[in-house]
């Protein structure tokens, strides 16, 4: 049977300058290079590959990626003489979908990963409560559990974009401190209700069991809303680098507050003013004042493909794809530009679109082989619109590294090489 040839793309399919196409164009099919056609007489028959001639490898206790995917790994940085301090970044540019595999979830540690014995670990709830409680892991496992998909982003993710000149790093190096997983555990409100909160309690202190004594103050209203004591990550026990045997999950809040290796929750009247929220994680504004308690992650988006390190192989049809997220709720819209923000077109959002979770967006693009500047701009359900870098710098200055959510720009040259630029 001969497949009907589809008509060429009509001028009305173009939605904006720079070759952006209607987001539904891929549904028509037959547009991408390499589309099969049975009318090609004399085509070479499908060959029998070597791996089809012998039995494959046996089963293993824990599945591993293909050996051909050995470059899909995290990269990390450590200060001198501090092997456990630093961050490992998710390779966003070579992943797809919205869920981050456990072994690629970003990690930020202040004093290495503790080797916590779950049988010896305890979670204590005390302070302004009527009945202090101590939980073993076995006791927590008896409580009703629930799951939710949520992103976690380090407050310093993208911080190098505050600097004067664009850092020549790829998507992973610039923005790899964000990941998304399905987290399963016990609602913190359940445990706090059992402890019985005093009326004067307005805050809580969350403390981890690592050598740095990581601790942060959290508004009690957030703890009673959607906070989770997470025991599982994408169906398996939370990885050690992400807090085994349990961590605090505060959907939409900056990552440092979502304390790993959680050992203590203390209810208080005021913030505790810990070292991790006074010496760090504040935003110094141009007027000399500091924004100390900036908890939610503001709406943000990022094109992951194409991006630096993924050289384009000549003019033709490509898919612009990326991620958007907001600590305020769901992503409502993502617009894409191929001309540095002069014109915009709405991208398609991949379902499901969930609150405080990564959302994948997609946009067809016919690259003509000339220079282009790719950008994305997110709008969340509250109406918050992702600002330009210039707008963000004007508001916050350049003396901070926290909560950068300005529009990111990738410059494409005639050779197909892609670099980080300011537009």
Image (cartoon, grey):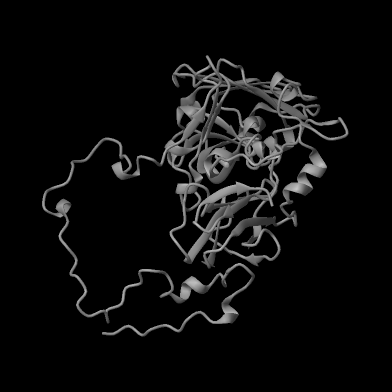
- Seen as rendered, the residue at the extreme left is 53
On the image, the x and y values in percent for residue 102 come to 44, 38
Q: Quadrant of residue 221?
A: top right
| Side (left or right) of 100 relative to 17 | left
Count of numbered badges drawn on the protein: 0
On the image, the x and y values in percent for residue 393 come to 77, 42
Residues 368 and 299: in front is 368
Residues 182 and 309: in front is 309
On the image, the x and y values in percent for residue 307 come to 53, 51
Residue 86 visible in the displayed image: yes
- Seen as rendered, the residue at the extreme right is 287
- Residue at 53% x, 72% y is 24
Residue 145 visible in the displayed image: no
| Side (left or right) of 133 relative to 71 | right
Residues 352 and 378: in front is 378
Name above or below for residue 394 compared with residue 293. Answer: below
Q: Quadrant of the N terminus?
A: bottom left
Name above or below for residue 134 compared with residue 379. Answer: above
On the image, the x and y values in percent for residue 67 come to 29, 41
Name above or below for residue 332 compared with residue 43. Answer: above
- Residue at 76% x, 48% y is 390
Name above or below for residue 41 compared with residue 401. Answer: below
Residues 82 and 343: in front is 343
């Amino acid at each position: 049977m001969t497949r009907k040839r589809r008509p060429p793309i009509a001028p009305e399919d173009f939605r904006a300058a720079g070759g952006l196409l209607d987001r539904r164009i891929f549904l028509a099919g037959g547009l991408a290079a390499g589309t099969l056609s049975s009318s090609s007489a004399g085509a070479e028959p499908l060959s029998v590959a070597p791996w089809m001639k012998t039995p494959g490898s046996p089963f293993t206790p824990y599945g591993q990626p293909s050996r051909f995917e050995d470059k899909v790994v995290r990269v990390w940085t450590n200060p001198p003489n501090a092997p456990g301090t630093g961050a490992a970044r998710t390779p966003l540019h070579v992943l797809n979908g919205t869920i981050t595999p456990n072994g690629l979830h970003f990690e930020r540690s202040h004093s290495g990963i503790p080797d916590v014995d779950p049988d010896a670990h305890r979670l204590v709830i005390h302070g302004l409560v009527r009945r202090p409680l101590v939980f073993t892991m076995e006791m927590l496992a008896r409580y009703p559990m629930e799951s939710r998909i949520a992103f976690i982003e380090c407050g310093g993710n993208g911080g190098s974009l505050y600097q004067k000149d664009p850092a020549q790093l790829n998507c992973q190096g610039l923005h790899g401190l964000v990941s998304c997983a399905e987290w399963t555990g016990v609602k913190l409100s359940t445990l706090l209700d059992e402890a019985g909160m005093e009326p004067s309690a307005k805050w809580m202190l969350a403390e981890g069991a690592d050598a740095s004594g990581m601790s942060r103050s959290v508004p009690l209203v957030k703890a009673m809303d959607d906070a989770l004591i997470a025991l599982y990550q994408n169906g398996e026990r939370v990885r050690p680098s992400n807090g085994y045997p349990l961590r605090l999950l505060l959907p939409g809040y900056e990552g440092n507050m979502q304390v790993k290796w959680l050992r203590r929750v203390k209810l208080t009247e005021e913030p505790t003013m810990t070292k991790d929220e006074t010496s760090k994680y504040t935003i110094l504004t141009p007027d000399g004042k500091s924004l100390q308690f900036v908890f939610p992650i503001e709406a943000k988006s990022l094109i992951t493909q194409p991006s630096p390190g993924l050289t384009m192989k000549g003019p033709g049809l490509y898919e612009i794809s990326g991620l958007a997220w907001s600590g305020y709720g769901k992503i409502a819209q993502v617009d894409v530009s191929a001309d540095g923000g002069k014109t915009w077109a709405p991208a398609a959002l991949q379902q499901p679109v969930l609150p405080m979770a990564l959302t994948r967006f997609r946009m067809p693009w016919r690259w003509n082989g000339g220079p282009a500047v790719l950008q994305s701009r997110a709008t969340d359900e509250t109406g918050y619109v992702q600002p330009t870098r210039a707008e963000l710098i004007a508001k916050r200055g350049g003396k901070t590294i926290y909560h950068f959510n300005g529009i990111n720009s990738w410059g494409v040259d005639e050779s197909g090489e892609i670099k980080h630029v300011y537009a």
